[in-house]
DNA sequence: GAAATAGAACAT
DNA sequence: TGTTCTATTTCA
């Protein structure tokens, strides 16, 4: 017998192995096996089987699973993702079933006949040790032994029920603010779980949105809500894993990893704020969890609901094309609460503008909490030597260096390597250096000086966990009012602080649902125009609306550089923003009307790079997607040479199949749906 | 992804 | 002709 094994390596083909007699009866598709590969031992997934034999093939070394850990539905979803993201199947399957998942730690044996009764209630791991794995395979195969998990007490089964055809599969966009969304979600959840069905809900993150939603949903549906994928908590993760298979009337919450989680008896998928960056997997295959969820709802024939104030353009396009239903409770910003101030050189350190101090000072005087948005998290993100007229660049990769004051380090924006800052230009030793592009750390420093009576909280991706843990949730979701540092007497419970909190932060501010903010200041929001490539308008709209969604300010004040002619007015009307932006994308042939793939090659020698580029071009002609290629662009990055090709292709073409063939040439990186173009 | 191998540049 | 470094191929 021959098995075809998908390995978690960047090679698109599968590898075939012979199965020794002893395992022929037991081995099944979608089990994990260990195989010899280049003098090493690798774990892989059986994705196909043949009855023939071939003496030239090597034998598999072992069978890891006693039963398949995924079924045809999950396999076909993974195959789809493999094509859609032009990634080898083994690399995708790793997200569905981790290669190092040791399921036997959570299973206990149950005897099904007399002569196995001594194994009853023995942990599977111990049974493996005492009886041997081959014996266990045989006992299970002959229905003499079964296994049940320690969390639900029910037998493990790898087969989900057939999708209920009575269920109506439809896609819905719920366009509305956080309170309306939450109410809608709770209503939907209760409709589904009351019939004993399960609901899968994807959330943008664990620490902020995750905990906020967990608290509210589990408050309403006690003991029925589970989080999947809590970092560092393997046991809790596995509890959710088994509950999702065997439980009834449960809500399974999760972020990226939950996109592939088998939830049996699942009858609804909810995706909250699908536009958030966190749905995109940053390492390995860069899949988008909400896209996987969308495909999954189609194949499982269950409804899916996307809720947000600013859904991704792909989703809104679905509405325009009649593929999505829409429930429109869209948020509008009152124009009378808005003020726009334009200043010269806003992003260069120095004295903060008088109007800025006034606006903040007024709110402080009224004891109102303030949120100040800035597009950058560190002190400044650009340093420029006035002697040699050069911007500070990373010596490893050539990226732009920024400055982080608290660590006194220069940090590369591209590769995030850091070096100690010496207060002089590394090139010419001059100490006449101009800082520009100020960020959250800079504003924090200046405002701490000016408003010493206030508590200043910096809210970035890195600090969000701490901010939320300390204040937002343990205070039973009360508005943000603790101000502990200024409490004069710890024992005085009746103390009501008067001094407001000033939150300074990046996009992460839009996760502070429980912060009681009256004034929102956007300091340099218009700079996203330059930072965000073709998605600039979309990003600006999303950030603005999501800040308003979470913080619910009464007043909004924009401080903008006078050179950047951006009118916030254009972003206030969701009724026209989406059709306009979609029209622009359609005319310019950009996503969501086409797919983009970035193909990257990095070599020491420019000649070698060029040679590989030629090969890619030749292969793309042969595979039939040559006409969609633009490039290649060469860039010197430190001492290395980087080549880039952009592939812009129609969504319906099977270009990905051809892209998978590129894995035959090694040393190239394919990035699907790049966001930095 | 990483070991094996082919290739290039340099020293003996 | 050996040594060492780098690019390329191949793995079942």
Image (cartoon, coloured by chain):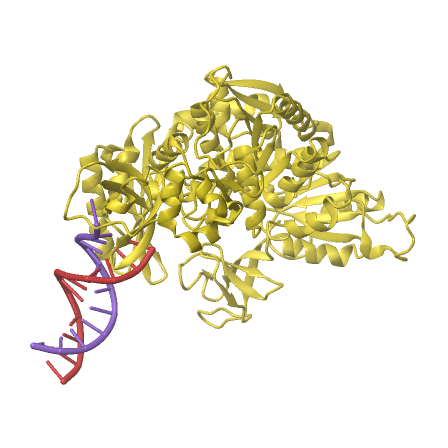
Chain colours: A yellow, B red, C purple
Q: Say whether residue A334 is left or right of residue C6.
A: right
Observer-nearest residue: A659 or A398? Answer: A659
Instruction: Please provide percent x and percent y for residue A148.
Output: 51, 40
What residue sits 45% from the left and 37% below the top?
A: A534
Observer-nearest residue: A278 or A227? Answer: A227
Observer-nearest residue: A138 or A317? Answer: A138
Instruction: Please provide percent x and percent y for residue A422.
Output: 54, 71
Q: Say whether residue A631 is left or right of residue A591.
A: left
In the rendered view of the protein, which quadrant contains the N terminus of chain A? Answer: top left
Q: Against A423, is A303 above or below?
A: above
* Residue A390 in view, yes or no: yes
Observer-nearest residue: A241 or B5? Answer: A241
Q: Say whether residue A206 is left or right of residue A11.
A: right
* Residue A453 in view, yes or no: no
Determine the image quadrant of residue A219: top right
Q: Against A332, is A239 above or below?
A: below
């Amino acid at each position: 017998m021959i098995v075809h094994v998908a390995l978690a390596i960047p090679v698109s083909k599968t590898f075939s192995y012979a199965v020794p007699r002893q395992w022929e009866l037991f081995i099944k598709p979608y089990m994990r096996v260990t195989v010899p590969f280049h003098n090493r031992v690798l774990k892989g997934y059986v994705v196909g089987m043949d009855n023939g034999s071939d003496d030239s093939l090597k034998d598999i070394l072992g069978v890891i699973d006693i039963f398949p850990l995924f079924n045809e539905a999950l396999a076909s979803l993974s195959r789809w993702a493999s094509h859609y993201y032009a990634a080898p199947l083994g690399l995708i399957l790793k997200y569905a079933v981790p290669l190092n998942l040791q399921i036997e730690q959570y299973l206990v044996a149950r005897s099904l006949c007399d002569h196995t009764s001594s194994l009853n209630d023995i942990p599977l791991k111990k049974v493996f040790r005492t009886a041997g794995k081959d014996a266990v395979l045989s006992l299970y195969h002959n229905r003499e032994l079964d296994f049940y998990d320690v969390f639900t007490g029910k037998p493990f089964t790898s087969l989900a029920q057939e999708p209920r055809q009575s269920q109506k599969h439809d896609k819905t966009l719920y366009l509305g603010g956080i309170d309306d969304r939450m109410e809608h979600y709770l209503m939907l959840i209760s409709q589904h779980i009351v019939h004993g069905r399960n609901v899968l809900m994807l959330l943008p993150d664990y620490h902020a949105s995750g905990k906020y939603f967990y608290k509210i949903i589990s408050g309403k549906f006690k003991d029925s809500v589970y989080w999947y994928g809590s970092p560092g908590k393997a046991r809790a993760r596995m509890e959710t894993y088994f509950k999702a298979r065997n439980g009834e009337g449960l809500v399974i919450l999760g972020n990226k990893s939950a996109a592939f989680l088998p939830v049996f008896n699942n009858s609804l998928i909810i995706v909250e704020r699908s536009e958030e960056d966190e749905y995109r997997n940053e390492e390995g295959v860069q899949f988008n969890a909400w896209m996987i969820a969308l495909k999954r709802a189609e194949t499982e024939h269950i409804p899916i609901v996307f809720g947000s104030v600013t859904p991704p353009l792909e989703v809104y396009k679905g509405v325009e094309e009649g593929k999505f239903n829409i429930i429109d409770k869209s948020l509008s910003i009152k124009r009378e609460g808005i003020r726009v101030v334009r200043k010269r050189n806003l992003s260069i350190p120095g004295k903060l503008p008088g109007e800025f101090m006034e606006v903040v000072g007024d709110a402080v005087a009224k004891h109102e909490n303030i949120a100040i948005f800035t597009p950058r998290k560190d002190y400044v993100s650009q340093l420029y030597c006035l002697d040699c007229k050069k911007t500070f660049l990373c010596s490893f990769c050539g990226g732009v260096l920024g400055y982080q004051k608290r660590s006194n380090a220069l940090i590369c924006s591209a590769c995030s390597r850091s070096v100690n800052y010496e207060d002089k230009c590394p090139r010419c030793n001059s100490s006449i250096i101009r800082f520009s592009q100020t960020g959250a750390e800079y504003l924090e420093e200046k405002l701490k000086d000016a408003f010493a009576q206030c508590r200043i909280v910096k809210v970035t991706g890195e600090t969000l966990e701490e901010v939320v843990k300390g204040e937002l949730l343990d205070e039973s979701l009360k508005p943000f009012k603790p101000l502990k540092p200024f409490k004069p007497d710890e024992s005085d419970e009746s103390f009501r602080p008067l001094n407001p909190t000033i939150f300074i932060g990046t996009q992460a501010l839009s996760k502070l649902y429980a912060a009681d903010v009256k004034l929102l200041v956007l300091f340099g929001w218009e700079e996203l125009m330059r930072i965000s490539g073709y998605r600039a308008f979309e990003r600006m709209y999303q950030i603005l609306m999501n800040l308003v969604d979470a913080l619910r300010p009464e007043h909004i004040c924009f401080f903008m550089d006078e050179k950047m002619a951006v009118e916030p007015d254009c972003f206030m009307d969701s009724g026209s923003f989406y059709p306009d932006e979609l029209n622009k994308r359609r005319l310019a042939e950009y996503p969501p009307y086409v797919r983009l793939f970035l193909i990257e090659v990095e070599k020491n020698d420019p000649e070698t790079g060029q040679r590989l580029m030629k090969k890619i071009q030749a292969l793309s002609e042969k595979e039939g997607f040559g006409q969609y290629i633009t490039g290649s662009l060469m860039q010197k990055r430190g001492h290395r040479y980087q080549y880039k090709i952009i592939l812009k292709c129609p969504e319906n073409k099977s270009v990905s199949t051809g892209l998978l063939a590129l894995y035959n040439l090694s040393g190239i990186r394919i990035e699907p749906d790049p966001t930095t173009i």
